Every structure is written in C-alpha cells, then in structure tokens.
Amino acid sequence: MSRWIASLPMYNVTPRHAALWHSLLSDCVTDFARVSARSFDPGDVTIVNAPEGELMPHWRRKDLLLSQTCGFPYRMLGLADEVHLISTPIFDAPGCEGPRYRSALVVSARAWASGANTLEACHGLRAACNGADSHSGMNAFRHALAPLARDGRFFASVLSTGSHAATLQALASGAADVGAIDCVTLALLRDSHPESFDGVRTIGMTASAPGLPLIASRALGEGEAQALRDALDAALAADPERARTLRLRGFARLTGEAYAEIEDMANAAAQQGYTELR
C-alpha cells in the first residue's frame, strides 16, 4: 500500500504536458529514494496528475511527498505554516524573470476591435477569472486594477471559469471581454494550441511575483526536504528535451518570506478600496 502521494497539477495544460510532468516527478521520486536517509521505495509513492476534489485538502495532506501550489494559498490561506517550501521553478516564458512570473492581461477580439487596447479602456466590460484563490488570475489582476477602480468596482460583471484555459475559451467565444492569465500557462498553451488564440489579444502584463512554489508535508524532515530539492535538480538534468517542452530551466530555492510580496499586492489593492475583483 502506498505511503505517500505526489502531484504536479498546476501546469498540466494538455495531456502531453501532464505526461511530461508525471515523468519528471517519477524521476524525482526515484532519485529521492536513492539518497533518502530513511528506508524509502519509489513504489511507496502514488503519483497523480489531477488530485480528486479540492486542491487545498490535497496540499495539506500529511503524506504529501511533493506537489505544487499557487502563491496565494501558500501565503494568504495558511499553507506556509503547514508545509515545507521546497523550491520555485524557473521558466523560459515571456513575462518570467528567474523564479518570478507575471500575468498577461488579455482581451477578446471583439473588445480589442471596440478600443479595449489598454486596461483603462476595459472599464465597464465583462471580466473572466479562473478562481478567487488564484494569484495570477485574481490577486495580480486586482492589484493592476485597483488604481483604476471607482467605489470598489471596475467591471460590469466577473465570470468565474475554474481555470486559465476556460478563461481563454470564454474570451475566444465572446462570453467575456478581459482576463489575466499566468504567463507560463499562456506560453505552454500557445506552444500546443496556437489556433485557440485567434480571438485573443494581449494588452499588457501585471507586476511580477515569485512563481508557483513546490511544497511537501512537514512529516518529512529538513534533510529530506533538502534531498527533494536535489532530486528535482537531477530530474531536470536527466531529460533536456522534456525540460525544453515544459519551458523549465531550473529551480530556485527561495525563502517563504519571498512570498510576502503576494500579500503586499493584496494589501495595496485593499488600501485603495478594491477588495474584490468586480
């Protein structure tokens, strides 16, 4: 019976990407088993591409060997107090700078044709957002909009889509006019499905923030957390073509305090009276 669970769910934008992340995680687990101080077998780990149910309970599992979360739940929803911060990926994508990333501000072709070629010009339009607990789709977007909002409002409506891919589909179909998309997700989707962007235009970028952190249960000791960091580096080097397709260049070892920037962005919006994306 498996004793641990592992997942890398945040950038599984296509089945091919999901398979590559699964492969990288499998190599990481194998290397970790080789160097771990405790008796550990790769067969003790169940690797899942898409955890069942809500992600927060998954990230809080005591048997979580490795996963990836968003900076917003890590900093704002209490995960930082419950998990090891293992590392932060470094991606080769427009909008990334080392382990930092931005969100692309995107509009539908119809909105673009109507003159919505700046964020200011999107006032009164229909927004789409992947989720209220997303830094890239909500918090960074809210931070960019806060100076432009009046009486705590900017949009006519906000559609909750459930994912960045669904936000892009809403824009392409005309169900929404504007949204914010994680720049890594955007680059990976452009690589795989460029035709799906025919009805979408990019009008800018949000401020940058630390990227999506890799985490592990604190049931692991500090030495095992370090072994996981080393195993991730080894898995990256094991298959350069896999890394290229994933646009993955490396892993940075940030401190948890680096993610205070995400809270600072939320506070800056609140201080301007823009506490919700609306």
Image (cartoon, grey):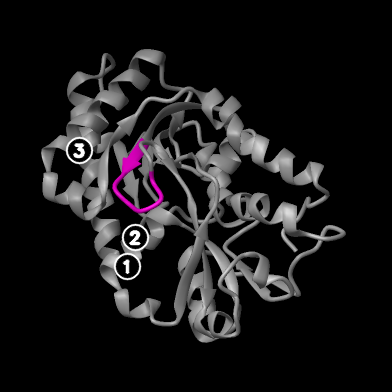
Rendering quarter of residue 45:
top left
Residue type (three-letter) at the residue carrying disc 3 = Leu
If you read the primary sequence from the N terminus, does the residue marked by circle 3 or circle 1 appear first? 1
Q: Name the residue under label 2.
A: 187
Question: Tag 3's secondary structure?
Answer: helix
Percent x, y of residue 33? 22, 26
> Closer to the camera, 130 or 67?
130
Residue type (three-letter) at the residue carrying disc 1 = Arg
* Residue at 83% in and 58% down: 152
Which is in the foreground here, disc 3 or disc 1?
Answer: 1
* Residue at 32% in and 67% down: 190
Q: Mark 3 points at which residue?
A: 236
Position of 18 with respect to 96 (left or right) is left
Q: Is residue 49 above or below residue 169?
A: above
Percent x, y of residue 43? 23, 37
Q: Residues within 10 Å of mark 1 (few under 14, many from 20)?
A: few
Q: Distance between the residues labelled 2 and 3?
A: 19 Å
> Magenta residues?
89-96
Q: Mark 1 points at which residue?
A: 190
Q: Is the magenta stretch mostly helix, strand or loop?
A: loop
Q: Distance between the residues labelled 1 and 2?
A: 5 Å
Q: Is residue 159 above or below residue 44?
A: below
Residue type (three-letter) at the residue carrying disc 2 = Ala
* Residue at 80% in and 41% down: 271
Q: Is residue 194 magenta?
A: no
**Can you say which quadrant of the picture contains the C terminus?**
bottom right
